[in-house]
Amino acid sequence: MAALQAERGYGLSCGRLGRGTRVSVFHVKLTESALRAFESYQACKDAVTSKPVIQFQGSQGHIAIPRPDRPTEVRTFTFYLSNIGKDSPQGSFDCIQQYVSSNGNIHLDCLGSIQDKITVCATDDSYQKARQSMAQAEEETRSRSAIVIKPGGRYVGKKVQVRKPAPGASDAVPSRKRPTPVNLASAIKRGNSAISQRPFKDRVVHLLALKPYKKPELILRLQKDGLSQQDKDLLDTLLQQVANLSAKDSTFTLKDCVYKEVQKDWPGYSEGDQQLLKRILVRKLCQPQNSSGFQGEAPSLSPPKDTVNSSSPPQ
């Protein structure tokens, strides 16, 4: 396809296909694995006898792409279908086709308005890549925070003098009770079991309330607290209800209207998560008030004190 030149006008026509032509246009969001499969087929499609096939089953379906290296096998990708007007009411899309006429001129033709979006689901390759990315990020975090003291370094060989307490001083100071050690592993296990008993929707909402997640990363995070196969199958439908999908980086962000369901004392939140949530809620929930002219909460006014008449009585 020839690139469109800047500062040059192009004619845009509609209905070039003619009436009665059955053409449906979709906004398609591919994963990296699906994109590589399409590119491999496109590069060797003349050597492959079979063709790609797409099949719809209600709001779901699958795409079968032939493998050039194995002509008898296909790569299958599942997808779900959603309405663009419902997910993104602020805008719409038109499908524009670029073609070259018989005289060599470039033309643009509008095939129709895009009403539905096809989102290809992640495969095992995508999950494996997400695991590797998360493991690499955790390793980088540990390497930045860990300090290794090598033998023979600046801290080795220094003597520290410890002064003995004066006689009788220990009797004057009351002895402190040592705190009972806490088994961190058992505490985390109890916290995870408490979270796994909560409704699946609440778990997803409280994770997305802190930061956006890609679907493979969200599944891995949910598996840490326990994720059943039934809840995993319902994740796509639930994400359509409570989150918006970013077309830029394929991340799911919690819808603004769902923030009112977030609990500040969620058992899975640490103290740092609670502080972060507090700032997010102030920005999300108080923004309409600030835009209307109110800056935060009005300071409370103390009740008026009784005034004392300091004027002297008339002589």
Image (tube, rainbow, N blue to C red):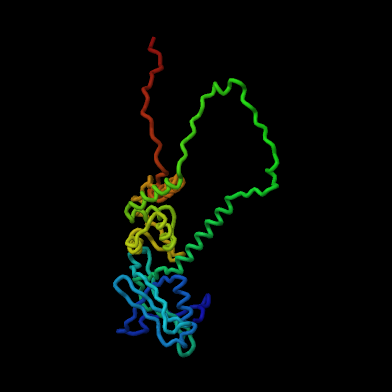
Relative to 201, 130 lies left or right: right
| 300 versus 238 height, above or below | above
Closer-to-camera residue (307/257): 257
What percent of the width, then of the height, locates residue 246? 42, 63
Q: Residue at x 30, y 74 (%)?
A: 57
Q: Residue at x 43, y 66 (%)?
A: 247
What percent of the width, then of the height, locates residue 129? 49, 66
What percent of the width, then of the height, locates residue 104? 49, 88
| 21 versus 218 height, above or below | below
Q: Quadrant of residue 24?
A: bottom left
Closer-to-camera residue (105/45): 45
Q: Residue at x 46, y 85 (%)?
A: 45
Residue most toward the top?
Answer: 315
On-image quarter of the C terminus: top left
| 166 versus 274 height, above or below | above
What percent of the width, then of the height, locates residue 237? 33, 63
Q: Quadrant of residue 25?
A: bottom left
Q: State the count of labels.
A: 0
Closer-to-camera residue (27/215): 215
Relative to 168, 205 lies left or right: left
